[in-house]
Amino acid sequence: MEGDAPIKVYMTRKLIGVSPDDSVKRACEVMVEFDIGSLVVVEENRVVGFFTKSDIIRRVVIPGLLNSTPVREIMSGELITVDANTPVRDVLDLMAKKGVKHMLIEEDGEIVGIFSLSDLLTASRRRLETAIAAE
């Protein structure tokens, strides 16, 4: 991993999301379908929230809410974002300080991607495989 590389090198550009009016159950079905741990919440083509597996445990299961609860009642509305050109080292520091596992990536004021620690692991694995193949 190059700590000075911009986060856009590691981020995932494909954003998968749900509507704020979708049920928690529907959001979970999407997460299972795509084998992901987080979703953006999109309303009128704009990201308005973020929804993670941790939200399900902390805000649905523990309080005993129904799986028919709308995502808007559970999602995190305060979006933590970084610019696409932010060095990966700085993003990892911010994630540690904020205690988050996912980071939304912005470019020109729009959310263009997401970064998670698994993205970093995938990039490191590819780099290792390339190095081994070159030997």
Image (cartoon, grey):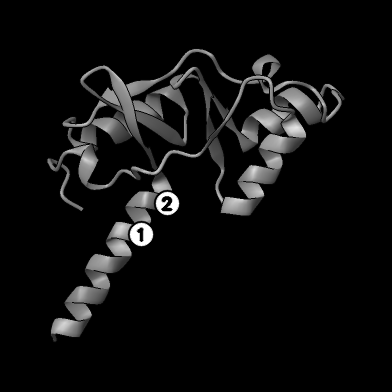
Label 1 belongs to which residue? 122
Count numbered badges in the picture: 2
User: What crowding class fits label 1: few (fewer than 14 Cα within 10 Å), some (14-19), or many (20 or more)?
Assistant: few
- State the mark number for residue 100: none
The residue depicted at 82 percent of the width and 27 percent of the height is 68
Residue appearing at x 14%, y 43% in the figure: 5
Q: Quadrant of residue 102?
A: top left
Name above or below for residue 35 compared with residue 46.
Answer: below
The amino acid type of the residue labelled 2 equals Ser
Contact, mark 2 vs mark 1 (Cβ under 8 Å): yes
User: Is residue 5 depicted above or below 55 in this figure?
Assistant: below
Residue wearing tag 2: 118
SS class of the residue under badge 2?
Answer: helix
Q: Quadrant of residue 38?
A: top right
SS type, badge 1: helix
The amino acid type of the residue labelled 1 equals: Thr
Residue 119: image location, x then y, percent? 37, 50
Quadrant in the rendering for residue 53 = top right
Residue at 86% x, 26% y: name it. 66
